[in-house]
Amino acid sequence: MALTIKSASDFAAMRRAGRVVAKIHEGIREAARPGVSLVELDAIAARITRDGKTTSNFLNYHGFPAHTCLSVNEQIVHGIPTARRLEEGDVLGVDAGAVYEGWHADAAFTMAIGEVPPRTRELIDATEQALWAGIERATIGTRLGDIGHAIGSIAEKHGFGIVREYTGHGIGRAMHEEPQVLNYGRPGTGMKLRKGMAICVEPMFNLGGDATRVLEDGWTVVTADGSLSAHFEHTVAITPDGPQVLTE
Ligand code: MG
């Protein structure tokens, strides 16, 4: 079960970790352009993690070798930063996390490198819209099925595939805690959110079908049909004042 954030100082520590994640996003967003390699982008994350007096919860996670997951085009999540250079028209997913005083934050965004076709832009925009639709419902007493439904119905409206094998999650003293936060669901079903919980809301939509597979590197998740994919994520605390996004 997800740990409950009980004290103001714990909340502040988690928010501090979240701010560093937001800075990593900002640094990578500014640097990402055609010709830049994925390892160069990961080095930016390493520097910002250090400067923020945080540690990385991605590095060495079950042996993961980097500070970020960088997933290009048909890669959905968990892409390993390599010497690959970005090209005009690529779709780049950036996922990063940080830990401060034992509290974790985790967030992701997807961006186009230069110009992309309108349907690709629609995929990126709809996935981000679904993120915020899910976050909006992250309030005390809401059920997880309500969040999943809010997210999934946006994919359905646009005719995009919904990644089902990977999900959002609880977060706190560990990066991945209970419960799973699905990107589809039935309203009024599933666990009720309680005050002090924190969850990662993270829609992953595909231009094509839902199905995924993992590459031989053991990490990189790609769409089974090779279609483009987009991923957005924030760490959100459930509070009496409503959802508090900790990673912006
Ligand atoms: Mg996550």
Image (tube, rainbow, N blue to C red):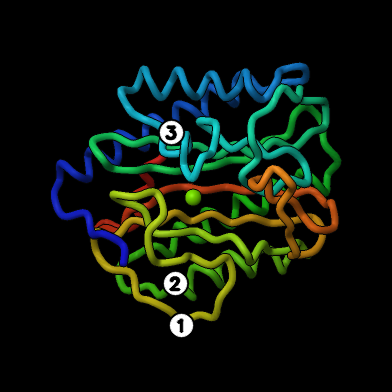
Task: Evaluate whether residue 158 shows in this view.
Answer: no
Residue count near mark 2 (Cα–Cα under 10 Å), binned few <14, some 14–19, many ≥20 = many
Task: Write the residue at 43% across / 33% down.
Answer: 21
Q: Earlier in the sequence, mark 2 or mark 3?
A: 3
Residue count near mark 3 (Cα–Cα under 10 Å), binned few <14, some 14–19, many ≥20 = many
Task: Evaluate whether residue 52 shows in this view.
Answer: yes
Q: Assign a secondary structure to mark 1.
A: loop
Q: Assign a secondary structure to mark 3.
A: helix
Number of marks in the rendered image: 3
Task: Write the residue at 50% across / 80% down.
Answer: 187
Image quadrant assignment for residue 149 = bottom right
Left or right: residue 158 versus residue 181 is right
Q: Amino acid at mark 3?
A: Val
Cα separation, mark 2 vs mark 1, equals: 7 Å
Task: Write the residue at 65% across / 40% down.
Answer: 79
Left or right: residue 124 versus residue 8 is right
According to the picture, the residue beneath numbered tag 3 turns out to be 21
Quarter of the N terminus within the rendering: bottom left
Determine whether label 2 and label 1 are within 8 Å by CB.
yes
Q: Is mark 1 within 8 Å of ligand 1?
A: no
Percent position of residue 107, x then y: 48, 43
Percent position of residue 161, x then y: 74, 63
Q: Amino acid at mark 1?
A: Thr
Q: Earlier in the sequence, mark 2 or mark 1?
A: 2
